[in-house]
Image (tube, helix red, strand yellow):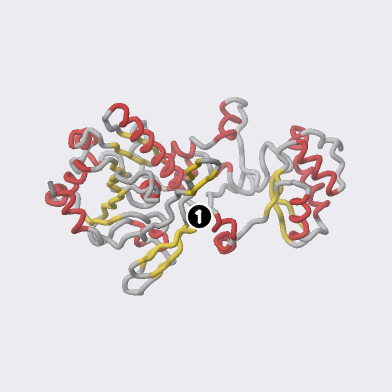
Amino acid sequence: MSGALQGITVIDLTRALAGPHAAQMLGDQGARVIKVEAPGTGDDTRSWGPPFVGEDEDPISTYYLSCNRNKESIALNLKDEDDKAVLEGMVRKADVLMENFRTGVMDRLGFSMERLLELNPRLVVLSISGFGHDGPEGDRPGYDQIAQGEAGLMSLTGSGPEDPQRVGTPIGDLLAGIHGAYGVMTALFERERTGRGQVVRTSLLASIVGVHAFQGTRWTVAGQVPAAQGNHHPTITPYGLFRCADGAVQISCGNERLWQKLCAEFGLDPVAEGMATNAERSGNREAVIAAVEAAFGDVPAAELLERLGAAGIPSGKVRTLDEVYAWDQTRSQGLVATVDHPVLGEVELPGAPLRFFDVEGGTQTETTRTEHTAPPALDADAEAVRAWALGD
């Protein structure tokens, strides 16, 4: 399958991770994505490492490889009038433009939101910022770890309230990219009705606050300030990481039926004092954890997972990334994309997280796009893009 977005053209003016991830999501579904980069240096992430791969004189950042598949590249100096004319030609013909400059930069370059939509009234513009494009701190630069702290995520992550930790991937950037791609698709859908494009805005701050979920309502509704509490769920018990004879396993007793099964399998008293309901167990969490770990204490992890699975109790181990990418289940879900890189040859990248199926006559036929192109070398497609932008 070539992808549902075949025929959609995206101008990707973004750099680092949030914007490139949003553009990559559209490219994964068949859109033509043209990455506009700074001459000489390109996207910031081309220099982010180690690790680098390839030849020492021309190192390739694995960070850059993670968020730029299915794109073309052209290098443009947006302060040069000739290069600005190329971008103007691209804008007239594109469907989407994405940018994540600091607030005001696009205006100074001569490509304000008003100017972009004057050039192409059907254009959908995605603008990603750190903390929002307006408000008292709208001009602040946005970097993931800073946003994780400012948006409260680090206060919820770590071994305890005195140990704030960032999430192990740049989750603020990634969420902004995901929300940005969702916003673009919404605007493209609305364009089918109105015939007009519009500006879509999101930020690292908005994207993190937007997924506070029940932790947010603990404060806004119940007046509780949540805090980090390690590897155990704040409102469901037992649910977390539990030590056993030779390591640890994770379990989730998300309802009373599962709690009863756990107790029956491992000889726990389901109605012991402080353990009869989830509310009681969550209020008596340390004692419940101690009781479960005592029951698990002499059981090796492999045996424990087998017993938990047989009893129907959701469970799992903590895998390292090499184990994840070697796991048959990961590969069965299309989560590894193989691309042919012009320098590195055949390499594997983390794959797209969506699958698509046609259903007819009781038969499901997968139509997911499985062929992808490698992240481009800097300015690799300049000639073709210039001809397209400046041609009739």
Q: Does 244 sit above or below residue 53?
A: above
Residue named by callout 1: 334
Tally of numbered tags: 1
Q: Which of 76 and 8 is in front in this view?
A: 8
* 64 to the left or right of 278: left
Observer able to see residue 343 = yes
**Quadrant of the rendered structure where residue 363 is?**
top right
Q: Classify residue 282 by image quadrant.
A: top right
Q: Which residue appears at 60% of the width and 48% of the height?
A: 158
Depth check: 224 or 129 in front?
129
Residue 9: x and y in percent read 28, 45
Find the residue positioned furthest to the top: 221
Where disc 1 sits, the SS reads loop
Answer left or right for 72 relative to 22. left
> Looking at the image, which residue is at 35% across and 59% down?
375
In this view of the protein, can residue 18 be seen by the observer?
Answer: no
Q: Which residue lies furthest to the bottom in this view?
A: 56
- Residue drawn at the location 50% of the way across and 41% of the way down: 360
Can you tell which quarter of the image residue 257 is in?
A: top right
* Residue 313 on image: x %, y %: 74, 46
